[in-house]
Amino acid sequence: MVETVVLAQAAAEGWIHRAYHLADVEPQGAGGWVARWQAAPRAIGGLGSRNLNAETVETLRWLSTWRNYLVHDDARARERLRTNGIDAGSEAAYLTADMAEEVIARIDDAFTDVGACIGWRTLAGLHSAYLWRSHDEG
């Protein structure tokens, strides 16, 4: 489960940095990788592009919250979990195979959404069939 969260977040962060690079667009402002996803449709696709779906943005924030908790486990990461309704001491109860499936499904949807907004201008939005393949698979 931990690997699923960490790798899904790394894929999302790495993908958006590469998309900006391929589009030859310099990301504007601060805010980290989630903000770059949010800005990408207009920054890369132009002012006529639609925003990401609200569900996509929620997924990115949710994934970031869990990843930061699992990797850093600092006070800020724990507080972000609390504001998302996760009581102190109950974190392990959420880290199940069901949550791993949820992570994959939600990030698949997020990549589909961003791919629909900007994928043809940079690189296709990923899908779990590409995210979870071994290096020696075709």
Image: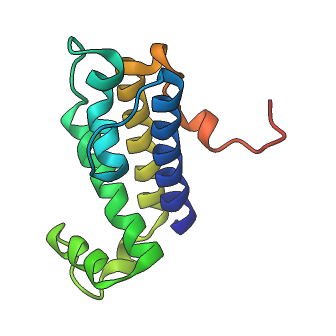
Q: Is residue 109 left or right of residue 50?
A: right
Viewer-side residue, 121 vs 8: 121
Q: State the image quarter where residue 92 is shown.
A: bottom left
- Which residue is rendered at x = 28% and y = 79% of the image? 78
Q: Position of residue 45 (x, y in %)?
A: 33, 16
Q: Position of residue 28 (x, y in %)?
A: 29, 38
Viewer-side residue, 24 vs 82: 24
Q: Is residue 35 left or right of residue 115?
A: left
How is the model colour-coded?
rainbow
- Which residue is rendered at x = 33% and y = 30% of the image? 40
Q: State the image quarter where residue 44 is shown.
A: top left
- Which residue is rendered at x = 17% and y = 70% of the image? 85
36 up-or-down from 3: above or below: above
Look at the image and tell me in which quarter the C terminus lies. Answer: top right
Q: Position of residue 137 (x, y in %)?
A: 80, 36
Please tell me how many numbered marks the rendered image carries: 0
Q: Position of residue 97 (x, y in %)?
A: 49, 62
Q: State the image quarter where residue 118 is shown.
A: top left
- Which residue is rendered at x = 45% and y = 68% of the image? 96
Q: Is residue 81 left or right of residue 91?
A: left
44 up-or-down from 70: above or below: above
38 up-or-down from 112: above or below: below
The extreme bottom residue here reads 89
